[in-house]
Amino acid sequence: MVANNFNEQQHKQQLCDLANGIPITDDLIAMTSFFKAVSDPTRMRILLALAKTPLSVNEIVDILAMSQSSISHQLSLLKQVKLVTSQRRGRNIHYQLADEHIITIFQQTKAHLFEER
């Protein structure tokens, strides 16, 4: 929450609440795992490609000009943190974004980074 109007009494209550600590919860761990996953440029490139269309490992290899083992490893990590899902289509497995929230987060991040101040 960004405070626009400073209220001394509310501020003192918030300080008291913070003194009790910000607990480490499963939600917090999941959120930090998300940010760790998207902090890698290769994984970000994969996610941006998947934002356009579902892709097989070989298609991603061709697009990013990287080895199949490297792409497979990155996809495995993205799948572990539930950023991508997979679906078999014939002999190939196609990967896609788990949901549209991922693109919304990217768009919001870009808007934040490049907004005029």
Image: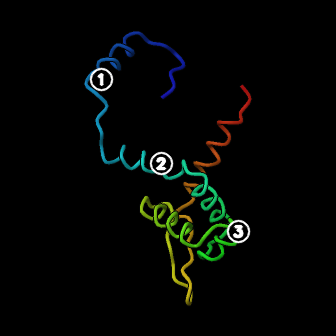
Q: Judge left or right: residue 37 versus residue 20.
A: right
Check disc 3 and report its element: helix, strand or loop.
Answer: helix
Q: Residue at x 62, y 43 (%)?
A: 108
Disc 1 crowd rating (10 Å Cα; few below 14, some 14-19, many 20+) is few
Residue 85 vertical position relative to residue 13 in the rendered view, above or below: below
> Residue reaching furthest left?
20
Identity of the amino acid at label 2? Lys
Q: Which of these two is toward me, 51 or 75?
A: 75
Mark 3: amino acid: Ile
Disc sitting over residue 63 in the figure: 3
**110 on left or right of 17:** right
Q: Position of residue 111 (x, y in %)?
A: 68, 40
Label 1 to label 3, Cα distance in Å? 49 Å
Q: Quadrant of the C terminus?
A: top right
Asked if residue 107 is positioned above or below residue 10 in the image, the reply reads below
Q: Residue 36 got which mark?
A: 2
Residues 12 and 21: in front is 21
